[in-house]
Image: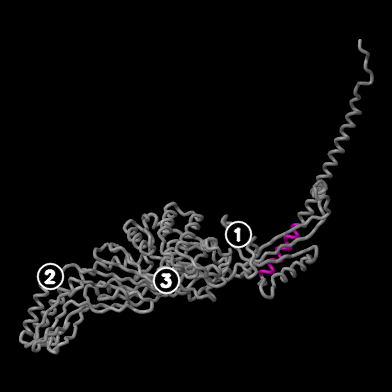
Amino acid sequence: MSPQLRGMGFNGSRQQRGAIGLMAAVTLGMVLLFMLLVVDSGRLYLEQRKLQRVADMAVLEAVSRGGNCTGTSTAAGFANQSATRNSFTPGSVQKVNTTCGTLSTNSSQLRVFTADATKSDAIRVIATTTVPTSVAGGLWSLFSKGGFNLNTNLTASAVGSTPGPTLAQISIRTTLATVDSSQSPLLNNLFTGLLGGNVAISAVGWDGLVKADINLLQYLNQLAVNLNVKAGDYTTLLTTNATVTDFIKAAATVAKLNGATADVQTALTNLQVAAIKNTPIKVGDLLQLQTGTSTAGLDTNLNLFSVIQAAIQIANKNNAAAVSLPVNVLGLAKVTTTVKVIEPPQFSAIGNPAKDRLFVRTAQVRSLITIELPVLNTVASLVSKVLDLVSGLLGAIIGTSYSPQILPPPLILSVNLDAGGADALVTGYSCPTGSTGTKSLTVLAHTALANLNVGNIDGSKAFSSSAAVTVTPLPIVNIVSKTCLALICSSKDYGGGGIAIMAKLPIAPTQSTLLFSAASSSEPPNLKLPPAAKNASPTTNVVASLKSTLSNLPIQLYAPVDSTGILGALATGLTSAVNATLLAVVNIAGGLISGVLSPLLDPVINNLLSLLGVNLMATEVDANLSCNQGGRAQLVL
C-alpha cells in the first residue's frame, strides 16, 4: 500500500491571489512599456513634422522671392533666413541644403525633380537635424552590429514651384476632320512621295492619326531620351538636329503611353519605316516654344497628325529637290504633279501673351502640275480656219509665204499654284481678377494667299525658295513667215503673229479678328483641355474666281514680226472677217484647253492642298488660355 502523501493539497484562495497579482504586475509593465513607446514615437513624429514644416516654409519663401542658383545665388540665403525665423538655425547639427532644378514627368507618369543649377523652375530644400534616439531605436541599435547610438538623424525634403505667368496656346490645325476611303489613297501617294518609302495606311489608320493628341511635355522628354540629351534641358534639345524618323519614333512611343489604338500604332510604324529621306532638321524648327517656358507650360496637348505633317514638310523644305508624286495622284491620266514646301509651318505656339509673340502659320506649298495635252480631234478645223485667214489676207504679198502651226509641239501645259501662308497672331487677352472680369483671347487671323499661273513654266526653275515662278504664254497659233530674196530664203517664228494663252491670278488673303470669350460662346479653356476653335473669314469667291479663270483663259496676241503680218492687219481693222475668224480660232482652242484644266480644280484645291495643311477657303485657329493668377508658390513634391 502506498504511503499517504501529505502536504500536497492546494489552498485555493491564497494561491489565486498570488497568480492575479503576478498577472497584474506583468500587464502594468506592458502598459507602461507601450505608453513609453507611444510617447516616444509621438515625440519623433512631432520632431519630424516640425522639421518638415521648416523645409516647407523655407522652399516656399525661396520660390516666392524668386531665388536662383546662378551667379549671386539667392535661393540658399532665402531658405536659411526662413529656417532661422522658424527656430531652426542652420549649423553643424541643423542643416539646410538648397538645390535648383526643373520638374518633369517620368515614364511612370510621376512628377520628378531634376537638379540643374542653371534653372529655377523648381527649388528643393532638404533639412536635416539630430534628436535623441527613441527607446525602440535604442534597443534595436543595442543589438545591432553598429552598437548603441544615442542620436537619430531626421531628414525632411520639400520641392516648391510657382504656377508661373498666364500661358496661352494657339495653333492652326489641318482642315481634315476625318479621313474616309476616298482620301486615304491620295494620302498614301502623297506621303510616299514626301517620305521616299512606300506608305500603305488604311482609312481607319489615317483617321486615327488626325483625331489623336499627344502630350507635348512627354514628347519633348522622349525626344531627349532618343537624342541623348540631358533630361529637362529643353534649350539644348531645341537646338539639336533630328530626322523625320526620330520625330515619328518619339511620337509613336508617347502615343502608346497616351492610349493610342492599334490602328494608330500600326500607322506610325508604317510611317517610320517609310521615312528614308532623313534630312536633318532642328527640333526647335518643329516645336515653336518661347524662351523660358516652364515645364508646367509645356504640359499641354498637340495634334498627332499636325506634328508628323509639320516634321515631314520642314524636312521637305530643307531638301533641295521637289517631290514628284505618282501620275495618278489627282486621279487624272497624263498629269505629273510636283510639290515642294517653300516655307515650313509653325503649327503651334505657347507662351505668355503679355510679353511673348505668339504667332502661327500654315505651310507655303508650291505645286506644279504638268499636263500632256491629248490629241485634239478638232485641230483640222483650226488649221482650216487659219489657212483661210492667211490666204485671204496675204496671198498677194510677193516673196512672202505664211505657214500656220496649230498648238506647236511640245503639247505641254503647266499649272502652278503657290498657296499657303495663312497665319494667326495673339493681339490681346484678359483674365478675371477675383470674381470680376472674364477670360478672353483675341487673335488676328489671315486666310491663305495664293497665286495661280497657267502657261509655259520651266520645271527646273519652278521651285526656287527665293524667286517667284516665271510663266510665259503657251502658243496656240504660230504663224511662221517665209521670205525669199533671190535664192536666199529665211523663216521667222510669229512673222505673221500668233495667239497664246497665259493666266496670272493673285488671290489676296482676308483679315479677320477672332475673339475667344464666353460672350461668343468660345471661352478659351485651360491648357491641356480640348481647345476652342474658330474659323477666319474665308477668301471671297476663291473657287469661283479660279473656275472663271480656267473657263475663260486670257488670250494674248503675239505682235507680228513682219509689218504686214496677219495681226498687223487685225490691228488696222482691215476687215470684220479677220475678227470673226480669229475669234473662232480662240473659241475652239480655248474651249479645248479649258476642258483639260477644269477637272484639276477640285483635286488640287480640295484634296492635295488640304492634305498638306493648306486651305484657301478657311483658316481654323484653336486657342487655350490658362490664367494662373497671383503666381503664388506652391509645394509640388
Q: Are marks 1 and 2 in contact (CB under 8 Å)?
A: no
> Residue sitting at 10 percent across and 72 percent down?
381
The residues tagged by marks 3 and 2 sit, at their Cα atoms, a distance apart of 46 Å
Residue 536, visible in the rendered structure? no
Is 253 one of the magenta-colored residues? no
In the rendered image, which residue does mark 3 sit on? 318
Q: Amino acid at mark 3?
A: Asn
Q: Earlier in the sequence, mark 1 or mark 2?
A: 1
Q: Earlier in the sequence, mark 3 or mark 1?
A: 1
Q: Describe residue 46's horizontal placement relative to residue 510 as left or right.
A: right
The residues tagged by marks 3 and 1 sit, at their Cα atoms, a distance apart of 37 Å
Relative to 62, say whether 577 is above or below: below
In the rendered image, which residue does mark 2 sit on? 378
Q: Are marks 3 and 2 in contact (CB under 8 Å)?
A: no
Q: In terms of secondary structure, where does tag 2 sit?
A: loop
Residue 615 at x, y percent in the picture: 36, 69
Residue 628: image quadrant is bottom right
Residue 578, visible in the rendered structure? yes
Residue 343 at x, y percent in the picture: 40, 73
Residue 155 at x, y percent in the picture: 74, 58
Q: In terms of secondary structure, where does tag 1 sit?
A: strand
In the rendered image, which residue does mark 1 sit on? 111
Residue 62: image quadrant is bottom right
In front: label 1 or label 2: 2
Total labels drawn: 3
Q: Describe residue 53's horizontal placement relative to residue 467 as left or right.
A: right
Q: Residues within 10 Å of mark 3 (few under 14, many from 20)?
A: some
Q: Amino acid at mark 1?
A: Arg
Is 52 one of the magenta-colored residues? yes
Q: Split into 4 quadrants, where in the image is the C terminus?
A: bottom right
Q: Please provide the residue range marked out in magenta.
A: 48-63
Residue 476: image quadrant is bottom left
